[in-house]
Image: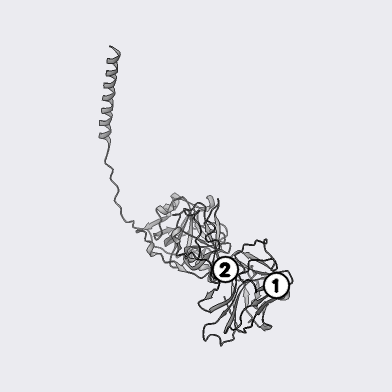
Amino acid sequence: MNKKNIQSVYTSILSLICIGLILFTSACKRDYEAPLLVEPIYNGPNANITIAALKEKYSNVTDPKVIDEDLIIKALVTGNDVSGNIYKQLYIQDETGAINMGVDQNSIYTTFRAGQEVYVNLKGLSMVKYGGELQIGFTGTNANRIAWEIFQEHTKVSGWPNAANLSPLEVDLSKLDASMVNKLVIIKNVRFNNGGINAYAGGTATVSEVVKDANGKTLDVRNSNFSTFAKEILPKGKGTLVGILGRYNGGWQLFLRDKTDVIDFDGTDAGTTPTDPEAGEVIFNETFGDGTYPSGNRPKIADFTGFDMKSPVTYTEESGSADIRTATGISASVWFPANKDVTLKIAGIQTANKADLTLNYQLVPNIYNVGETTNLNAMKVKINGTNYTIPSTQVTINSTDDRNKYYTITIPNIAAAATSTIEFIMTGADNAFGFRLDNIKIASATAGSGSDNTIIVTK
């Protein structure tokens, strides 16, 4: 057989093999049928405890505590890892409160979407305290997170997810409390300090970007470098944020779920003549900056360059004891150290031809341990040479929730002058723990509101 005939035989054999394989494959192949989508129905036990009651029941845990009772909660998913900004956490909320669950799994959002109703069988899971706040986890695992298989056994969905069922709680940064921890919130009229400059998370780690409201109160917005929007630039101007309000060792934080939580920022720069809708025209407003100190950490009054109000306003403190600093849960403020005589004098405030003037300022007493107590009238106030007596207001630490509380003092009907001077006076004998002074404002009161001379202290 010549070479040409041999090649022809090989070709025929190969053709027969290919035909056989095709016929065999066709015989074994089955048409794929997509499964029908059926709305999930939960058939397990009814819920028998609320989130608020669960947190109260385990409020005193320090180490992870295994739940040994048949406890079941019913809640809605409010936050997940859809954008990568929330990592291995699921946030759930009912009508009483909110809590997060540590889950050792990525892409949780594919099953547990925002607005999904869930039932969680808690028996066998653990209550864990992290950063001073309770969460649901699993004892002895990495970061006490629940393994995915165990999480699926304990957490069941009910019905289709519906994000329209979620109504964010509108909050005021000066009135945050423990009941809001881990809740879905909405915060209006805030500005990013680095809007138009920084990215959400431009480096290789999770970072905090500060937002400030119209009253100078600040909040850390935590942004992960793994989020889908990490490299985008922070918006300029004033707008609205939605997100999960967290707290870590007393410091409040906001976690954006995705980029749609950043709403209607107007792109403008901060205004030069702030106004307060409740108080009319604001003449003077000092927040002591955003915590960035070009002149060094904790600058003294004489060295600080970040005051909101510029010349002709001046700031002096002769003892050299006070400085500008921040603390956990507290924005930039003037620190009045314990057992020191300190007087902060602010002069050159233009109040000529203004009527119905009211002074507001905020104090944070530096008491920390349960049982510690101090009085807000330890700080004396003198305006244009007139001393004002602050009502006796005793403040006591009864629980950890009482730490770092802001108290607002309102002094109405202060006299106008061509240039006004305010002195905040603290004597060491009255100041055993230290105080922080923040958010000093002079505003013209709304019509008809300036007849009462009562000095008011509010929490």
* Residue toward you, 54 or 204: 204
| Residue 56 in sight from this viewpoint | no
Give left or right: position of 120 versus 291.
left
How many other residues sit within 10 Å of disc 2, few (<14), some (14-19) or many (≥20)? Answer: few
Q: Tag 1's secondary structure?
A: strand
Asked whether residue 4 appears in the rendered view, the answer is yes
Q: Helix, strand or loop at disc 2?
A: helix
Which residue is farthest right? 319
Q: Residue at x 37, y 59 (%)?
A: 161
**What residue is disc 1 on?**
316
Q: Which residue in the protein does label 2 denote?
A: 401
Q: Is residue 338 above or below residue 202?
A: below
- From this viewpoint, which residue is outermost toward the bottom? 451
**Which of the two discs, 2 and 1, sits closer to the camera?**
1
Report x, y in % for residue 215.
55, 72
Specify few, some or many for label 1: CA neighbours under 10 Å numbering under 14, 14-19, or 20 or more: some
The alpha-carbon separation of the residues under discs 2 and 1 comes to 34 Å
Residue sitting nearer the eye, 92 or 336: 336
Q: Nearer the viewer, residue 129 or 276?
A: 276
